[in-house]
Amino acid sequence: MHFSLLLLHLAGATLLLLYAVHMVRTGMERAYAGLLRRLLGEAKGGTLRAVTGGAAMAVMLQSSTAVAMIACGFVASGLLAVPVGLALLLGADFGSALVVRILSFDLGWLVPVCLLVGGIMHLKLSGERLRETGRMLLGIGFILLSLRFISEATGPLRHAELLPVIAGYLASDAMMAVLLGALFTWLIHSSVGAILMISAFAAQGVIPLEAGLPLILGANIGSGLIAFWLSRSMDGAAQRLPLGNLLFRAAAAVIALVMVETLGVPAILRGLDPATALVDFHLAFNAVLALSCLPFVKPVARLAARLTQEPEAKATRTSPANGPARSTAR
């Protein structure tokens, strides 16, 4: 198959994957909004409940970014404290990684079941919840189908002359791989889609583990960048949540990268096939992230508050020499 046609198939499969993830999230938000609100309400009971609630919400929405944006709204309205919100997002990060782990199993037999049952529910049944549940099943079927298309499109790429050169360069320049993974994840606005695509490339032998691990770490940073970018127009209180989560992710990614570069690829990962190794690494990274960062949610919340402090608020401080700042409000 011609190289340009392969890229066209890969682009189409990628867009199908992103659209399918959006379908599942939309169906869940419309059909089970009350359940999501209850989970978020229970999360306010403490950090441990927040982690559990965040993981459950991310599994249902198949997106840690969606959980972050919902939580930002609650923080802005004063219904959720920033430290508890950070714990919620740590749980959501793990829940999103768990979704990737589930979708990476061989679930090809589930494609026709989801398409048939979901199509009937969405097109033929009455009742909004039934129709939206059908939309979710259709989305899951399309996700699995898109992964099959990506696998078929990436297989012949192993024989392309340019890709082995690029893969070798990324394997030798881990920092560039991290930046590329972060940029790609931010551009497609889906960490689930990015991780699944990276693992699909690894399954076809296009990406070696030495390049795949930094790409996964970059994808985790990019996932934090998505929520941070989407919250840029919100008030300072709401921005502290994605900023704190981004600080957690970036610090953990740097530490993990230093360990991988110093100690090499863990032997336990080399014993697995590349796709499974990358997905398991992603899951383990987010599990360790949640456990290790949970005790630091309050200090990071204070740091995020300083970083998002409004300049106008600083200007209102008074000094004996200058007196109180004048207000320009009319």
Image: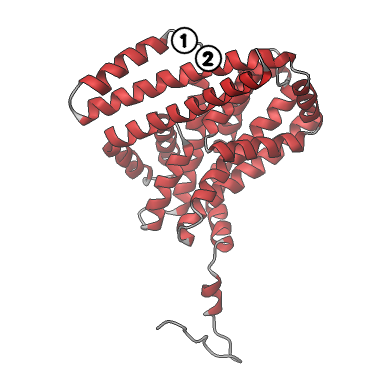
Q: Residue furthest left?
A: 126
Instruction: State left or right for residue 245 relative to residue 44.
Output: right
Residue 104 can be seen, yes or no: no
Q: Which residue is depicted at the point 53% across and 43% down?
A: 294
Residue 58 can be seen, yes or no: yes
Q: Nearer the viewer, residue 253 or 293?
A: 253
Residue 306 location in percent, x, y? Answer: 57, 63
Marking on residue 148: 2
* Mark-to-mark CA distance, 1 and 2: 8 Å
Q: Which residue is depicted at the point 27% across and 23% down?
A: 122
Residue 170 location in percent, x, y? Answer: 77, 30
In the depicted structure, whether residue 117 falls above or below residue 78: above
The first of marks 1 and 2 along the sequence is 1
Residue 237 location in percent, x, y? Answer: 46, 59
Instruction: State left or right for residue 111 relative to residue 250.
Output: left
Q: Which residue is depicted at the point 69% across and 36% down?
A: 180
Question: Element under label 1?
Answer: loop
Q: Which of 82 and 233 is in front in this view?
A: 233
Q: Nearer the viewer, residue 222 or 285?
A: 222
Quarter of the image where one finds residue 165:
top right
Quarter of the image where one finds residue 176:
top right
Q: Which of 223 and 156 is in front in this view?
A: 156
Identify which amino acid the numbered label 2 is placed on. Arg
Q: Which residue is depicted at the point 32% across and 13% down?
A: 116
Instruction: Write down the residue under mark 1.
Output: 108
Instruction: State left or right for residue 121 relative to residue 154.
Output: left
Disc 1, disc 2: CB below 8 Å?
Answer: yes
Identify which amino acid the numbered label 1 is placed on. Gly
